[in-house]
Amino acid sequence: MMVSEEAKTARALGQAQGRTVSRYLTALDQTKPKRGRQRSTEKMQARIAELPTEIAQAKPLKRVHLIQELMDLEAELSKEEETVDISEVEGEFIAIAAEYSGRKGISYAAWREVGVPASVLKAAGVARNRSSD
């Protein structure tokens, strides 16, 4: 059975849109604020500066806990520095979201449930449908 060029084009478009949606939702997850009280960068850096002295003076069991604390703080700081610029993937999502939603039957409410901001859906032209909210 031969697949028409039109079908191949439609499939390729659908796959590209799926990748765009996936990249955007992944970026949203990565930029989502963490639960609980957030430590400021300054407080983390101050604690990192204190730890070597405490580690040097600590008994072995306490030392391993302090070393782990230092490693965790350094990892958290480096993660903050790697902030994801969501604007590019957000723009790509906005360009295809309405068509993708219509084709896949994804409602405004479903997008909101996974964390897509209302302003992004509005910019994309994804209608808030009362019957699905």
Image (spheres, rainbow, N blue to C red):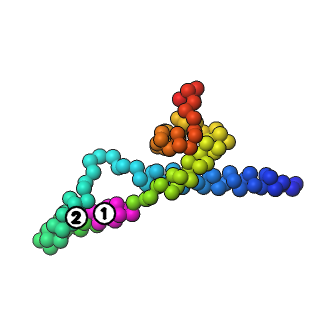
Residue 56 spot, x, y in % from top left = 15, 73
Residue under label 1: 77
> Magenta: predominant secondary structure element?
helix
Displayed quadrant of residue 82:
bottom left
- Residue at x-position 62% and y-position 52%: 18
Give the residue furthest to the right.
Answer: 1
Q: Tell whether 84 sits left or right of 3.
A: left
Distance between mark 1 and mark 2 Cα atoms? 8 Å
Magenta region: which residues?
Answer: 73-82
User: What is the secondary structure assignment of the residue under circle 1?
Assistant: helix
Residue at 58% from the left image edge and 40% from the top image edge: 125
User: Which x, y percent locates residue 62?
Assistant: 18, 65
Indicate which disc residue 11 carries.
none
Mark 1 surroundings within 10 Å by alpha-carbon count, few (fewer than 14), some (14 through 19), many (20 or more): some
Horizontal and vertical percent position of residue 106: 60, 39
Q: Is residue 111 above or below residue 28?
A: above
Q: Which residue is mark 2?
A: 45
| Quarter of the image that includes the N terminus | bottom right
Residue count near mark 2 (Cα–Cα under 10 Å), binned few <14, some 14–19, many ≥20: few
Query: Upstream in the sequence, badge 1 or badge 2?
Result: 2
Tell me, yes or no, whether the two marked residues, 1 and 2, touch with CB atoms within 8 Å: yes
Q: Extreme bottom residue here?
A: 56
